[in-house]
Image: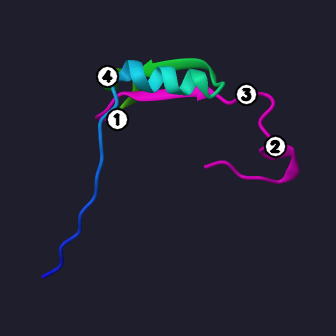
Amino acid sequence: MRVRRTTSWALTRRELTEFVAQAGFTDIAWHPPATSGFHQPVLTARRPRSCSAPSRAEGTHEP
């Protein structure tokens, strides 16, 4: 027998929205299952322009 344990917690939509905004993301939007096609609400946001992640022009691929 194997036993695995983990700790998790749920964030409210409001809490998650606040955390995303505090991280500097903009254009934060929630998409309900009826419009997204997923069984859970989906949050989308735009990363800050000052983010140092490589751009697509530099040959990166975003899934």
Determine which residue is flagged by label 3.
48
Return the residue found at the far bottom. 1
- Disc sitting over residue 55 in the figure: 2
Horizontal and vertical percent position of residue 13: 37, 22
The residue mark sitting in front, 3 or 1, is 3
Q: Amino acid at mark 4?
A: Ala
- Disc sitting over residue 34 in the figure: 4
Q: CA distance from mark 3 to mark 1?
A: 26 Å
Give me the residue at 58% from left, 21% from top: 21
Find numbered disc 4 in the image and state the secondary structure of the residue it sits on.
helix
Q: Which of pointers 3 and 2 lies earlier in the amino acid sequence?
A: 3
Horizontal and vertical percent position of residue 48: 73, 28
Q: CA distance from mark 1 to mark 2?
A: 28 Å
- Say if the magenta span includes residue 58: yes
User: What stretch of residues is rendered in magenta?
Assistant: 39-63
- Dot 1 crowding, Cα within 10 Å, few <14, some 14–19, many 20+: few
Answer yes or no: do the residues labelled 3 and 2 have beta carbons within 8 Å? Answer: no
Answer yes or no: do the residues labelled 1 and 2 have beta carbons within 8 Å? Answer: no
Q: Amino acid at mark 1?
A: Phe
- Dot 3 crowding, Cα within 10 Å, few <14, some 14–19, many 20+: few
Instruction: Name the chief secondary structure element in magenta.
Output: loop
Q: Report how many numbered discs are placed on residues in the image.
A: 4
